[in-house]
Amino acid sequence: MTGFFGKNLITLDETDSTNNYVKKIAMEGAPEGTLVIAKRQTAGRGRLGRKWVSQDESGIWMSFLLRPDIKPENASMITLICALALQKAIDEVCELETDIKWPNDIVFNGKKISGILTEMSADTLQINYVVAGVGINVEPKEYDEEINKIATSIKKETGKEVDRDLLIGRFGDIFAGYYREFQRNQNLLFMRDEYNRHLVNVNNKVKITDGDSAYVATAIGIDEQGELMVKDENGMLKKVRCGEVSVRGIYGYV
Ligand code: ADP
């Protein structure tokens, strides 16, 4: 592996979660760009404590370490940068034009190909590190009933073999370019329009759940902070911050 991920690459047969692994080595001083790839995860995680199915070798399960010089409140934008970089890399390397479900999922025909989980260690003024975890379903697979309805894989959709190293390398290069730009500006203006072009939610009704409260609104697109702009049922413009909220389609996953 060369480029952004070339500095420190760790490959594992099995680990509980590559995010957990990177967190551990981050505390021991691992450098920015350290990439951990596992063949299998025994306890892969999604957002909000959800499970990410990744116990076998059907996908790319990886996490990488960042030490960005940005304010902690801006770190959540890294999730959106990952999503757009991955959308582009899958398009270029696998010739599959996917969509993005805000903030962080890569979908094709409404089914999920990839999930991204970013986690941060910070105090009020300064970030210690950010771990970005990316799970990409590569091979077709039978999941349990619930996940079967919402999951798909690159090979299932293209019918072609996936060059995993090429995909990871291209993702790293695209991500690195965006990440540099982001650190300069600390906003997403440079990629906002492109992100919105691929955003599957645009003009769709979404259900926004934040803790105990939920409401339905029509998605418009992201602003330069990566927040999802929506119009609620009274026509009021609202902004959804990416954090502990979940956004779903009102009729299904998208
Ligand atoms: P969301 O952001 O959509 O709320 P997460 O990013 O937290 O969801 O991902 C976890 C969810 O993804 C799980 O609850 C499950 O429904 C689904 N899921 C778990 N494993 C996979 C997988 N390998 N492929 C696609 N979807 C999965």
Image (cartoon, rainbow, N blue to C red):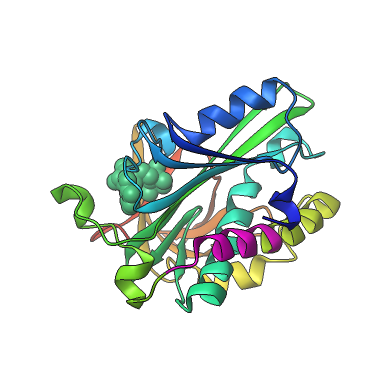
Give me the residue at 40% from left, 71% from top.
Answer: 161
Q: Quadrant of the C terminus?
A: bottom left
Q: Is residue 123 above or below residue 130?
A: above
Q: Quadrant of the N terminus?
A: bottom right
> Which residue is most to the right?
184
- Answer left or right for 62 relative to 151: right
Question: Visible in this render: residue 5?
Answer: yes
The image quarter in which residue 63 lies = top right
How far across and down, in percent of the image, does residue 23 sit?
Answer: 60, 27
Give me the residue at 39% from left, 40% from top.
Answer: 40
Magenta stretch: includes residue 168:
yes
Identify the magenta region.
162-173
How far across and down, in percent of the image, does residue 90 sit?
Answer: 51, 69
Depth check: 186 or 206 in front?
186
Magenta stretch: includes residue 42:
no
How far across and down, in percent of the image, does residue 62 sit?
Answer: 52, 45
